[in-house]
Every structure is written in C-alpha cells, then in structure tokens.
Image (cartoon, rainbow, N blue to C red):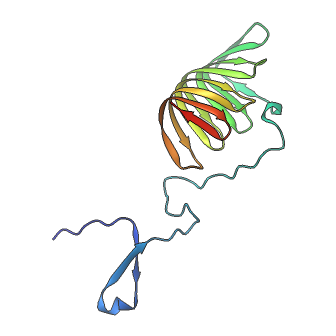
Amino acid sequence: MKIPRLPTFALLASSALATGTFAAAPAEPTDGPWGLCDMHAPPKSRTKSAVSPKELPTHLSADHGFAVKDRLAVFSGDVLVRRGPEQLQADTVIYDQEKDTAQAQGNVRYRDENLSVDGDASHVELGAETGQFDNAKYRLEEQHARGEAVTAIRESRDVLRLK
C-alpha cells in the first residue's frame, strides 16, 4: 500500500494517543512569520537614514578606469559602485559625476536593502535611488516576491514597475 505524502504539518498527538489516532494541523511558526520558510532570511528592518543618499560618498572600484572630459569616467573589469545601501556591479560602468548616474553593461547586479536585480544593462540614478534594468531577474525581499521582466523600472525606493 502506498502512503500519500502530506504537506509540511506538525502531528499533534491528542488524548487519543492511546488509541493510536492523530490529527494533522498546520505547523506553527517558531520564529515569527518566517519560521516555516527555510529559503529566506527574515527581512532586514529598513530605517530611514537621517542622511540623504545624495550626501553619501560614492565608492568605485574596477580593474581599469579612465576619465572622459571632466565629469565622465569609464570603468571596466569587475566594476563595483557603492553608495550607502546601494551596490551596483557590472562588467562596464560609465559614471557621470555631474548627473550622479551610472550606465552599466554586462552581468549587471544591483542590490539594496530590499531589492535585488540581475540583468544585461542598467541606468541607475544613485542619489535618487531610481533606475532601469534590462532583461531583469528581480527579488523583493520584504514582499517575498521574485520574477523576471523585459524591463524593470525603479521609480522610487518603494516602487518597481515591470514590463
């Protein structure tokens, strides 16, 4: 006889244990709302920083880089751009200091406290915490959501529009 496989449940023994009968009930979370979820860590609490993202320093590192005019810099090879909780990685990044934007190409990976996006290319406005990502695979940690989109547009810190 084949025994059917049950979903994750905790078996609750009742006073009927002596007779050998059991009741199945959904397992209770032991660690808040994420206790049953072994795939993800609990979301990080986001506290509004007293410092505007525009006031935070921008850190750039890459294998190669050169300046174009006074405001543009081109970086290539394992590029990493960081500002506060934002992090952008790519094969190539053109950083415009005056406009405070980063144009990324190749193996693009963007991360902040709630949003993770991998894609082919992106245009990120660092101070505004907005951007557009092409051929995007995204994950919204707090909402427990993930998916793919031809284009993901981050309109604000809390709004991601998908096409």
Residue 127 locus on image (x, y percent): 75, 30
Determine the residue located farthest toward the left in the rendered image.
Answer: 1
Determine the residue located farthest toward the top in the rendered image.
Answer: 69
Residue 148 locus on image (x, y percent): 47, 35
Judge left or right: residue 49 versus residue 112: right
Q: Residue at x 66, y 26 (%)?
A: 124
Compared to residue 50, the image places residue 107 above or below, namely above
- Quadrant of the rendered structure where residue 128 is? top right
- Quadrant of the rendered structure where residue 111 is? top right
Compared to residue 37, the image places residue 148 above or below, namely above
Q: Nearer the viewer, residue 61 or 108?
A: 108
Judge left or right: residue 6 versus residue 162: left
Q: Nearer the viewer, residue 137 or 128?
A: 128
Q: Residue at x 77, y 13 (%)?
A: 71
Q: Nearer the viewer, residue 155 or 68?
A: 155
Residue 120 locus on image (x, y percent): 51, 24
Residue 137 locus on image (x, y percent): 50, 34
Compared to residue 71, the image places residue 107 above or below, namely below
Q: Residue at x 62, y 33 (%)?
A: 154
Judge left or right: residue 14 versus residue 37: left
- Quadrant of the rendered structure where residue 20 is? bottom left
Quick one: quadrant of the N terminus?
Answer: bottom left
